[in-house]
Image (cartoon, rainbow, N blue to C red):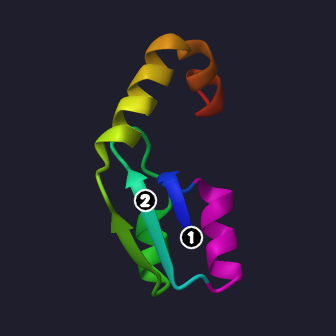
Amino acid sequence: MYTSLSPCDMCTGACVLYKVAQVVIGENKTFVGGEAYLKQRGIEVIVLENKECQDLMSKFIKEKPDVWNEDIGE
């Protein structure tokens, strides 16, 4: 599975349920989801620390803090 951010709990569960072997994450500075659980379940987790992903998320959070805070439950 390829994802721009660390996977949320639902995506983490889907990866485990459907026996995804590897999750490639664009960046995890903005949000750290179920990475530890994935690793615990034997799923390989690769974090690219991709600058483009980091820049896109920084821009989104700056421009839409109300949406971001609502999505992460703050």
Give the answer, above or below, for where 51 lies relative to 44.
above
Label 2 element class: strand
- Name of the residue lying farthest toward the front: 52
Give the answer, above or below, for where 53 lies relative to 13.
above
The type of residue carrying mark 1 is Met
Give the answer, above or below, for where 57 lies relative to 32.
above
Q: Is residue 66 left or right of 59 when viewed as pictured? A: right
Q: Local crowd at mark 2 within 10 Å, few (<14), some, or many (≥20)?
A: many
Residue assigned mark 2: 25
Query: Which is more toward the observer, 18 or 51?
Result: 51
Q: Horizontal and vertical percent for residue 40?
A: 43, 80
Query: Residue 11 falls in which quadrant of the image?
Result: bottom right
The residue shown at (53%, 15%) is 65
Query: Which is more toward the observer, 12 or 5?
Result: 5
Residue assigned mark 1: 1
Magenta segment: does it hold 17? yes
Q: Is residue 72 left or right of 26 when viewed as pictured? A: right
The part of the chain drawn in magenta is 8-19
Identify the image quadrant of the C terminus: top right
Query: Residue 58 falls in which quadrant of the image?
Result: top left
The residue shown at (53%, 57%) is 3
Q: Is residue 73 left or right of 32 when viewed as pictured? A: right
Give the answer, above or below, for where 58 lies relative to 49.
above
**Mark 1 vs 2: CB contact within 8 A:** no
The type of residue carrying mark 2 is Ile
Q: How many labels sit on residues?
A: 2
Q: Horizontal and vertical percent for residue 33?
A: 49, 54
Q: Disc 1 to disc 2, how far (Cα)?
A: 8 Å
Query: Residue 16 falls in which quadrant of the image?
Result: bottom right
First reached walking from the N terminus: tag 1 or tag 2:
1
Q: Horizontal and vertical percent for residue 29?
A: 33, 42
The residue shown at (32%, 49%) is 50
